Amino acid sequence: MPRDSKTHPPASIMHLPLPRPRLSLTVPIMLAISLSLSFLLFFTRASPLSPFSLNLRQELAARVEAPSCDAHRNGSNVDVFKTYTITDDNRSQYLYDPNYSYFGPVVGRYANRIRNSSFSIPTKRDLSDAAPGTIYHVTPNENHNNDTLHGGVVGTSHSGWSLLKHAPNQLVFGLLDSNGTEGFPGTVSIRVTYTLKRDSTFIIEMDATAYEPTPLLLSSHVYWNLDGYIESQTIKNHTLLLKSDKYVEGDGIEVPTGVIGEIGEDSPLNFRTPRTIGSKLNDTLGICGTGCIGIDTCFIYEEDCKDDEVKMELSSAASGIKLSIKTNQPAGQVYTCSGQLGLTPRKASQGGPTTNYDQYSCVVLEQEGWIDAINQPQWGQNQIYGTPGREDYHWWSEYSFSTF
């Protein structure tokens, strides 16, 4: 489509309403959908395909509420993701909790960290080399305002999304991210599509159109615990497979340094052969920041990885649940919740509210591009959209559950 046909956002999302009340409906194949942005999927050991449900909260994007199967508890449901206990009285926690840690949303317009909360278009490694009028400063919100995390104070995670379409196995949400929001140039229209399949699989697709040059890097930020805090309270016993031989090095506050590190056979970041997360966790000192033990790292997938093959896989021998992820993204961020310090009460299905979410009790698996590439032109990763012939952004990931 020629560029002049995309000079204005589509009318369908020109005026997005504020979040709507929660609605519910039931459809065949036992799919229960609540029109809000989080999903609920579960299945039993006896039949991994039944029931399988998706529960989406419309307040914010991409909340995944997922009781799944428990292989060792007679098919009882296990709630495998971390978030708040949602009631009509506490839905505002997603907006106002001072300890909010991106519980399940779509993060953007630029996910992860931006060095010095600044970038230029065209991109420059040293902004002193950028021409006047080409440097942009976005809202800092982390490390004493020394960088920007997940798009700023509001970002896509705290924005009001509109329901654009619903079908028995699919929901589509839209957001109009206006020019100047958080300091980002250009208006961007974003659609997020959630599709539930019959084979214990759901797909998330994020499509965005930029109307002026602007950086785009979206991701889904879900905290997983495949034991549901029943068999164990930690993800150290979870086994991770990660097809990656390189990673983005970070400094003491986890901002990319510009160096792409090699992952050797003995590295604590080597998960090419599946092993438990905790097996080399004590060897990670400093990898997730100064004095930090844990993983909060952007792994670059091996070049020969295809989009239709599993690039990342998480499993728990305690529950017998396996999560396999395919994606069109070139990298994946793994965060082992080293910064979760017991400040947020667990939801009732995970033993709350008298107990809290503790350190290493969850893991985030973000599928995304190379982080902060907008400040690293030497990497050759073009993340600027809205230029002629490059208006459209597409993100796709498939999440499949099985038992073993």
Image: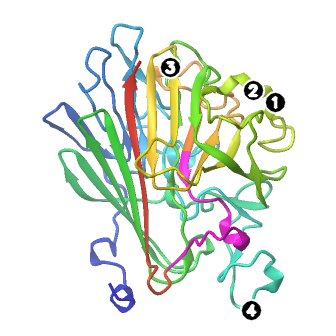
Marks 1 and 4, Cα distance to the nearest angstrom?
A: 45 Å
Looking at the image, which residue is at 54% across and 26% down? 346
Q: Is residue 65 left or right of residue 371?
A: left
Magenta highlight range: 366-385
Q: Which mark is residue 165?
A: none
Q: Is residue 364 magenta?
A: no
Marks 1 and 3, Cα distance to the nearest angstrom?
A: 24 Å
Secondary element type, mark 4: loop
Q: Is residue 314 left or right of residue 341?
A: left
- Circles 2 and 1: CB distance less than 8 Å? yes
Task: Kindly identify the amino acid type of the residue bearing the numbered disc 2.
Answer: Lys
Q: Which mark is residue 227?
A: 3
Marks 4 and 2, Cα distance to the nearest angstrom?
A: 47 Å
Marks 2 and 1, Cα distance to the nearest angstrom?
A: 5 Å
The quadrant in which residue 309 appears is top left
Q: Earlier in the sequence, mark 3 or mark 4?
A: 4
Q: Which mark is residue 280?
A: 2
Task: Kindly identify the amino acid type of the residue bearing the numbered disc 3.
Answer: Asp
Can the viewer see residue 112?
yes
Q: Is residue 224 above or below residue 114?
A: above
What is the x, y in percent for residue 208?
42, 69
Marks 3 and 2, Cα distance to the nearest angstrom?
A: 20 Å
Q: Which residue is mark 1?
A: 283
